[in-house]
Amino acid sequence: MAQPLKLNEDLDLRIEGHRRILFEVVESQPETGLVADAEFERGIENLARFFPSASWLKLQRYSPNSLSVRTGIRKTSLLPLERAVALGLVLGKLEECERFEEFMKGFNNPTSFFDTVFEAQAANYCLSKGFPLRFGPEYSVRGQLKHPDFEVSTPIGTLVCECKSGHEADYKYVRILDRFTGALDDMAKQSGGVPDDRRLEVHITGPIRVDWGRLATEIVQRVLPAGKLPSDQIVTVGPCSVAMPMRDSPPAFTWSGLVSVRVVVGATPVGITEEYQHLRVSSSRLHRQQVKLAGSLIADALSQLPTEGWGGGLP
């Protein structure tokens, strides 16, 4: 398993001397899995070149494996060092594209920083196929001027692209499920824990209109200790179906949409497959909401694209 990078001082990667220190540190710590080869150095050098005034280009001693990027008011997100290097390499390939300077302005808006990273990845994929690429083309769409992210000239026509990536806030359903799983896990531990040979499974089938903690308490009181619920039985607790199958058996709810699990962790590393899970929470309802979110992103992207010509209207 790769070990965290260790730094003795904060490094500002806009400063050449600090970049040299980083390269030496990475080379001296092969256990991190990072390799201070020519690509690594070029990726870091490109970041310093493209973002000469970016305050986020700093590695802190207490968090040396990620760069902290401001993504909103009093809000930051981490950009892992490996992803940062990859971004620098991608930008080095894209800088020859027409209107590259316009594309780079997307990084100036904190809320769209990671959207622009995604756009760079998509553009790089298209460019890798050997087709010319131009950023920010102008089209008239239903009487309004639109500027899709980029267009690619192919042998069979121009491909116009609009990139959409879900923001962290859009994945609230995943966080909701994980918080509920944590509440269940805490309550189960307070009640003596799930028996070693059993797995507590909770499948959310409807909207939860009560406090998560209260529902978790009700579920645990209903099914723990394990003797309260036979391994082949499913009961209903509020908007949830609950089962406690044997841990070496398949999940009680086979198609379950979004899934959050807790595993037994001891001295030996384990996987996250069913035989190691003592708690499994799922929700097809939250999964449908995720699908709805994806549909809205596609619809938004289509509104930016020309409706005529080859490929027009395709997400």
Image (spheres, helix red, strand yellow):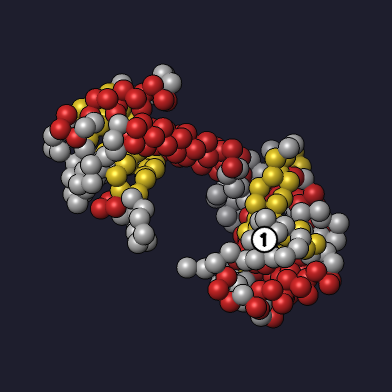
Is 284 or 98 nearer to us in this picture?
284
Q: Position of residue 69 (x, y in %)?
A: 72, 50
Q: What residue is pinned by disc 1?
A: 64
Q: Residue at x 42, y 37 (%)?
A: 182
Q: Residue at x 23, y 31 (%)?
A: 224
**Looking at the picture, which amino acid does disc 1 mark?**
Pro
Left or right of 185 on screen, residue 129: right
Q: Position of residue 40 (x, y in %)?
A: 68, 74
Is 287 or 74 nearer to us in this picture?
74
Quadrant assignment, res 289: top left
Q: Residue at x 22, y 35 (%)?
A: 243
**Is residue 99 visible to us here?**
no
- At mark 1, the secondary structure is loop
**Is residue 312 visible to us here?**
yes
Q: Residue at x 28, y 35 (%)?
A: 192
Q: Position of residue 235 (x, y in %)?
A: 20, 27
Quadrant assignment, res 279: top left
Is 9 or 72 nearer to us in this picture?
9
Q: Given the current orientation, which residue lies at the most extreme top position?
A: 210
Quadrant assignment, res 229: top left
In the image, residue 111 sits, relative to residue 238, either above or below, namely below
